[in-house]
Image (cartoon, helix red, strand yellow):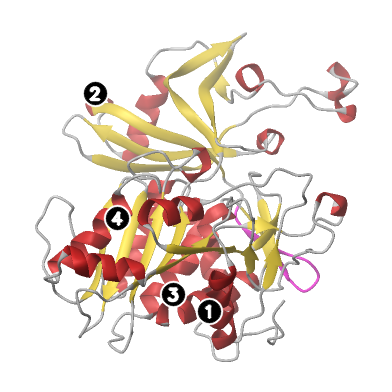
Amino acid sequence: MSSAASRPTAGAFDRGHTDDLMAFLMASPSPYHAVASAAERLEKAGFRRVEETAAWDGTTGGKYVVRGGAIIAWYVPEGASAHTPYRIVGAHTDSPNLRVKPQPDMGAHGWRQVAVEIYGGTLLNTWLDRDLGLAGRLTLRDGSHHLVDVDRPLLRVPQLAVHLDRGVNDGLKLERQRHMQPIWGIGEVHEGDLISFVAAEAGVDAEDVSGWDLMVHAVEAPAYLGRDRELLAGPRMDNLLSVHAAVAALASLAGRDDLPYIPVLAAFDHEENGSEADTGAQGPLLGNVLERSVYARGGSYEDRARAFAGTVCLSSDTGHAVHPNYAERHDPTHHPRVNGGPILKVNVNQRYATDGSGRAVFAAACEKAGVPWQSFVSNNDMPCGTTIGPITAARHGIKTVDIGVAILSMHSARELCGSDDPYLLANALVAFLEG
């Protein structure tokens, strides 16, 4: 662990950053909303959207591309050459949840229900007996998309009463198909009811809706916990905490023309189910954007190769804080603590992309920002998760370092972190992007 002080010595962000994170979480119940929220913040900092279908020019300044639930943003300082390397912060916009099926209207015994599919490795029991809303996007016949957010109690996945399952406290067994379909009313089931309701919420005609990407979310607002408000509970911290920090860090560099690198935000969708999508880290989106930026500045393939060779990516995702009730599940010599600063994630089998030289880059950024940091390694008896880090390194030949914030209850409908860690991460990201 770093010996730096417990607060940044000269950082751009303080506890107000964590307050702003709470607002960002509430405004981002789906990847599409997260991208819209990120784009709005970047626009305020002077970034402008460019379309993938348009010709790009070599002008300097902040730009961003949106594709579905993914956003790539970058800032080209004055004087940047065609072979100027990139400094990238990678993250993902999606979180494990329940997603609406193509034929959503179902029910039984007088109850009206919504047919859902399990997305990612969610903790199923955390969705039980919780007030749930519905959010996502509708696609109309003309190809346009409309965001929708029913941010009020609408659905509920009711748990079976203990009187009807006396052994429930000895081990809860949930069947994904039978037990996780939420209720949203009573009465007869009519095909088209849910989409008609959602279309009305979005202010569009249900007859014009030809597709949808809808998902369930907990409507309870994020909140500080603890005697001294030293903890933060909220939804989708995995991984909107990193997205928010990266957006704030990149936006803070707008107008900086003394940067030796081109700072980049790459926030992908579909990380929680393997990243194999046109908006995922396995897809070509990031590589296409970086290459087109090189060529728009008059560069050649040689310039592209030089730029990529000097590029470094921080793959920022949440990790596991030591759990006080299950400490034996963690590596005995690596116990990351909340409010201990961001974590460096290491796995020699390349489930994380960090190596010794990557560690040095991250350590230098934290030292510059005056931010403490910690190391995370999985217990040898526990399978290690993975991130977009190894994918980015292998697909693009870019040096990548896996980092993040230590949390509890990962993949729960409501996760927990230290209330200092979000702004500690953001300050470290600024120092990294600055070079």
Q: Tell me the quarter of the picture where residue 122 sits.
A: top right
Q: CA distance from mark 4 to mark 3?
A: 22 Å
Q: Residues in magenta?
A: 221-231
Determine whether the residue tagged by mark 1 lies in a helix, strand or loop. helix
User: What is the spatial separation of the Cα atoms under label 2 and label 4, in whole angstroms?
Assistant: 38 Å
Q: How many marks?
A: 4
Judge left or right: residue 221 versus residue 264: right
Q: Which mark is residue 139?
A: none
Give amino acid for label 4. Gly
Q: Quadrant of the C terminus?
A: bottom left
Viewer-side label of 4, 3: 4
The residue beneath circle 2 is 207
In the picture provided, is 6 more to the left or to the right than 267? right
Q: Please identify the quadrant where the N terminus is shown.
A: bottom right
Decide which of tag 4 and tag 3 comes sooner along the chain: 3
Disc 4 target residue:
287
Please tell me how crowded label 4 is: few (under 14), some (14-19), or many (20+) other residues with Cα within 10 Å.
Answer: some
Cβ atoms under marks 4 and 1 closer than 8 Å: no
Q: Tell me which residue sits at (21%, 84%) in the image.
A: 78
Q: Residue at x 54, y 51 (%)?
A: 387
Q: Nearer the viewer, mark 2 or mark 3?
A: 3
Judging by the rendered image, the residue that carries numbered circle 1 is: 427
Three-letter amino acid code of the residue under disc 2 = Glu
In the rendered structure, which amino acid carries the disc numbered 3? Ala
Secondary structure under tag 4 reads helix
- Label 2: element kind: helix
Marks 3 and 1, the one that precedes in the sequence: 3
Above or below, 134 against 42 in this view is above
Q: Nearer the viewer, residue 351 or 226?
A: 351
Q: Disc 2 vs disc 4: which is toward the camera?
A: 4
Tell me the residue that label 3 is attached to.
249
Rendered view: 188 above or below 389: above
